[in-house]
Image (tube, grey):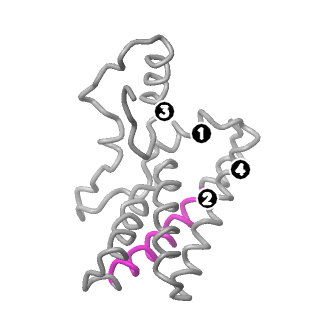
Amino acid sequence: MDGHLTKPVDYATLLSAITAATSCTMPSRTENNPTSSAVEVDKDDRSPLRLDRVSFDQTLKFLPPDEVAASLQQLRARNEQMLQLLQCRTERALLAESAHNLASAVGLFGLMALSGAARSFEHALANEPPDIERLAAQVQIETHAAIEILDVLMGESRMHPA
């Protein structure tokens, strides 16, 4: 193994790593990692931005134009599924797996606040901290917000096909 990438994947870094791996050279390390700045902070309330538009647009560049709407709809369905699991208070293992999968998927599309909330909830399910209910509520809040954002983005993708 010559290197690794962390999720959510930054496609420029991924392409650089693939190029380096296929040309038998070591990938260069850059201090300016785009994924480290993906979670920007709103100066007013110190909370992560709900949508990192740069990450979102970057992901769309790698999707075939005819798959954009379907991908956004699948992502929206994952959000709906998480809301159902939270409402039913399903078993912890299933909740943790769903939170993990949701965090990765929404992070890839730049929904950073939900990605962070889902990761925190996933870890809480494993460690059972006293604030687990607060974390579950935060996932619910961010999931509802993500669904609203996805609805707007799906409307945009219909109006402006890539």
In front: 43, or 136? 136
In magenta, the rendered stretch is 134-152
Q: Which residue is mark 3?
A: 11
| Local secondary structure at mark 3 | helix
The residue sitting at 76% across, 40% down in the picture is 66
Marks 4/3 in contact by CB < 8 Å: the verdict is no
Q: Which residue is mark 2?
A: 75
Marks 2/3 in contact by CB < 8 Å: the verdict is no
Which residue type does callout 1 highlight? Leu
Label 4, label 3: how far apart the Cα atoms are? 20 Å
Question: Residue 4's x, y, as percent?
Answer: 38, 35
Of mark 4 and mark 1, the one earlier in the sequence is 1
Label 2, label 3: how far apart the Cα atoms are? 19 Å
Quadrant (top left/top right/bottom left/bottom right) for the C terminus:
top right
Which residue type does callout 2 highlight? Leu
Question: Which label number is shown at residue 69?
Answer: 4
Question: In the image, which is nearer the foreground, mark 1 or mark 2?
Answer: 2
Q: Residues within 10 Å of mark 1 (few under 14, many from 20)?
A: some
Question: Residue 128's x, y, as percent?
Answer: 30, 81
| Local secondary structure at mark 1 | helix
Of mark 2 and mark 3, the one earlier in the sequence is 3
| Local secondary structure at mark 4 | helix
21 in relation to 56, above or below: above
159 in relation to 126, above or below: above
Of mark 4 and mark 3, the one earlier in the sequence is 3
Q: Which residue is mark 1?
A: 60
Of mark 3 and mark 1, the one earlier in the sequence is 3
Tell me where residue 5 sits by quadrant: top left
Question: Residue 140's x, y, as percent?
Answer: 46, 77
Q: Residues within 10 Å of mark 4 (few under 14, many from 20)?
A: some
Residue 151 in the figure: left or right of residue 38: right
